Image (tube, helix red, strand yellow):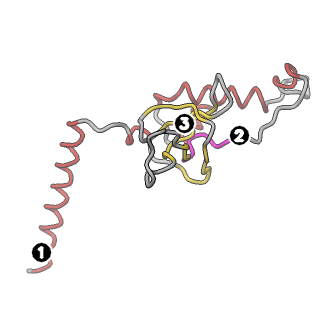
Amino acid sequence: MARSMMNERNIPQTYWVEAIHTVVHILNKAHLRPHSDKTPYELWFGRPASIKHFKVFGSKCYIKNNDENIGKYDDRDDEGIFLGYATNSKGYRCYNKRLHKLVDCIDVKVDEEIPVRNISSDEPRTKDTVEDEDEQVQGLEREEFESDEDMNT
């Protein structure tokens, strides 16, 4: 199940732990046990679990920015990727694209309809990747220039 979720949303294998935690969370709250009409949550707590907080793994999300130094015209939220549920508190586990790290947060808006780009493409750029991108851009500009010359002749 974890592999399917990761493949569906193009999440890199480095986040397999988050996918496994999400699957376990879902199975504990929603999966019925054989020979019983109750979930593990119901057996333990004696009441049915609420699943209204379930979100689609790998969806685009917006994390409320609680930074004290936020300016008047600064963004109030950061774009991220929903990767599951916080283990030690109520809340969600998200990859914050601005900070380039996993964060536990409560104030999150998840857009379950929009799949996101691969996380690995959002990782911090190094000097080598910047140089490679510059070479690719120069190559594309050269091709466009050559095609424009061909059209003019």
148 versus 92 height, above or below: below
Give the residue at x 11% y 80%. Answer: 152
Mark 3 residue type: Cys
Task: Give the image quarter of residue 90.
Answer: top right
Q: Which residue is mark 2?
A: 54
Describe the element under mark 3 as helix, strand or loop.
strand
- Give x and y (percent) for residue 14: 46, 28
Q: Residues within 10 Å of mark 1 (few under 14, many from 20)?
A: few
Q: Residues within 10 Å of mark 3 (few under 14, many from 20)?
A: many
Q: Residues within 10 Å of mark 2 (few under 14, many from 20)?
A: few
- Spatial CA distance of label 3 from label 1 is 49 Å
Describe the element under mark 1 as helix, strand or loop.
helix
- Give x and y (percent) for residue 28: 76, 26
Which region shows up in magenta? 55-60
Q: How many marks?
A: 3
Q: Magenta span has 17?
A: no
Q: Nearer the viewer, mark 3 or mark 2?
A: 3
- Give x and y (percent) for residue 78: 49, 45
User: In the current view of this chain or complex, which residue is farthest to the top?
Assistant: 44
Describe the element under mark 2 as helix, strand or loop.
loop
Mark 1 residue type: Asp
Residue 94 numbered tag: 3
Q: Are marks 3 and 2 in contact (CB under 8 Å)?
A: no
- Spatial CA distance of label 3 from label 2 is 14 Å
Mark 2 residue type: Phe
Give the residue at x 49% y 46%. Answer: 79
Residue 150 numbered tag: 1
Please state if 105 lies on the left or on the right of 140 as rendered: right
